[in-house]
Amino acid sequence: MERVRIGVIGLGIMGELYARIYSTHPLAELVAVSTRRQERLAEVAKRTGVKNTYTDYRKMLERNDLDAVVVATPDSFHFQPARAVLESGRHVLVEKPLTTRVDEADELLRIAQRRGRKIQVAFNHRWLSPYQQAKAALVSGKIGQPLAAYARKNDTIFVPTEYISWAGQTTSAWFLSSHDVDLIRWLLEAEPVEARALGRKEVLAARGIPTYDVIQAQVKFSSGAFATFESAWIYPNTFPSIVDSFVEVLATAGHIHMDRKYESIEVSSKDSFSYPKGFLTGEIFGRVRGAFPSCLEDFLFAVREDTAPHVTGLDGRQVTAALEAIHQSLETGSSEPVRPLPADLQAAYARR
């Protein structure tokens, strides 16, 4: 396979970024894109040079020149296009979270097993050097056994009110904590088993956006360690960064702190003070570089070399299961069990 022939479903902020990165990557050929709005298709086609555009992704999947497809629709709309991609015999790269229901995630895993296709979930934070160093420190054992963790990912109110138009169809936990649940599960090498959560709906509800302002959840893991996950998106827009991101792991012989609020640069002017973001994506000599493009590139390698993605469908499923339990706890006010992997999927993954 010379180049991996790619399609993209969903052309919002992230979908266009996928299209842009793959349109210039030497190992990829951006064959087609799909979104419901014709004017948006025209915009992305002009910016990326893609020739084939569709308002119905099912028509796009009738093509015979696609090897893999990206699903970059909003959080709660991943399942149907991802299922269609797998059933069409293509590999799929899904924006986080994999799905917002565990039964849907389980169905995707079963289809991927039956069709012999790969699922990668775009938990791109795993490609950041500090998190890789944290993983190495934990694997080495030099800081001992992890006991507890804390992860905060809080956005300014710009994100749910202006940056995305579908905040009312998701929550800060699905949108933000999904990254952190994946990171902590990966760092601890343990599965989530129980969750308890609290949340508030005040600021955004007053603006007509029916979602939580802030959610805090505690998740117990199979190792006995536990983690607190905080997500909010009501910081004032005067905050110097669009996101405040912090991860801590406490262990028996040490600790790890990873603070991404400040990414090595600060900029002040007469009007503002800011911490510009550049670790995940950054424009360098006319191309997008960083952890996010590396995540996309490794999907190409997984397809070309027939290897397992670095973040699999199983990883995505386990994050969805933890977040589903968190949201159930928000409704019930009680601790909720995290649904384990069904027996048939346990057996399938044990054979691999």
Image (spheres, rainbow, N blue to C red):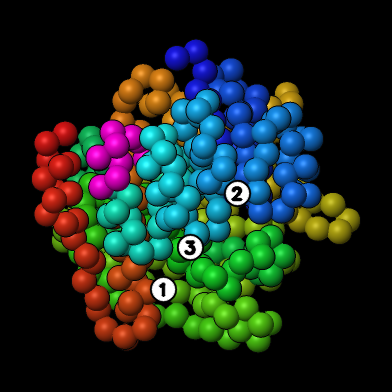
* In front of the other: 77 or 145: 77
Which disc, if any, is residue 56?
2
- Asked whether the viewer can see residue 84, the reply is yes
The mark nearer the N terminus, 2 or 3, is 2
Q: Is residue 69 above or below residue 79?
A: above
Q: Position of residue 32 (x, y in %)?
A: 62, 34
Q: Residue at x 11, y 54 (%)?
A: 343
| Residue farthest to the top, as pictured | 2
SS at circle 2: loop
Which residue is found at the position 20% from the left and 39% from the top? Answer: 141
- Tell whether label 1 touches label 2 (CB within 8 Å): no
Q: Amino acid at mark 3?
A: Ser
The alpha-carbon separation of the residues under discs 3 and 1 comes to 21 Å
Name the front one of labels 2 and 1: 2
Whether residue 83 is situated above or below residue 100 in the rendered picture = above
**Numbered badge on residue 312:** none
Q: Residue under circle 1?
A: 216
Q: Secondary structure at mark 3?
A: helix
The residue lying toward the viewer, choosing from 216 and 294, is 294
Please indicate whether residue 267 sits to the left or right of residue 320 in the image.
right
Q: Is residue 314 left or right of residue 240?
A: left
Hey, what amino acid is under mark 2?
A: Asp
Three-letter amino acid code at the position of disc 1: Gln
Q: Quadrant of the N terminus?
A: top left
Residue span colored magenta: 110-120
- Residue 287 vs residue 231: left or right? right
- Local packing at callout 2 (Cα closer than 10 Å; few below 14, some 14-19, many 20+) is some
Give yes or no for residue 274 being in the magenta stretch.
no
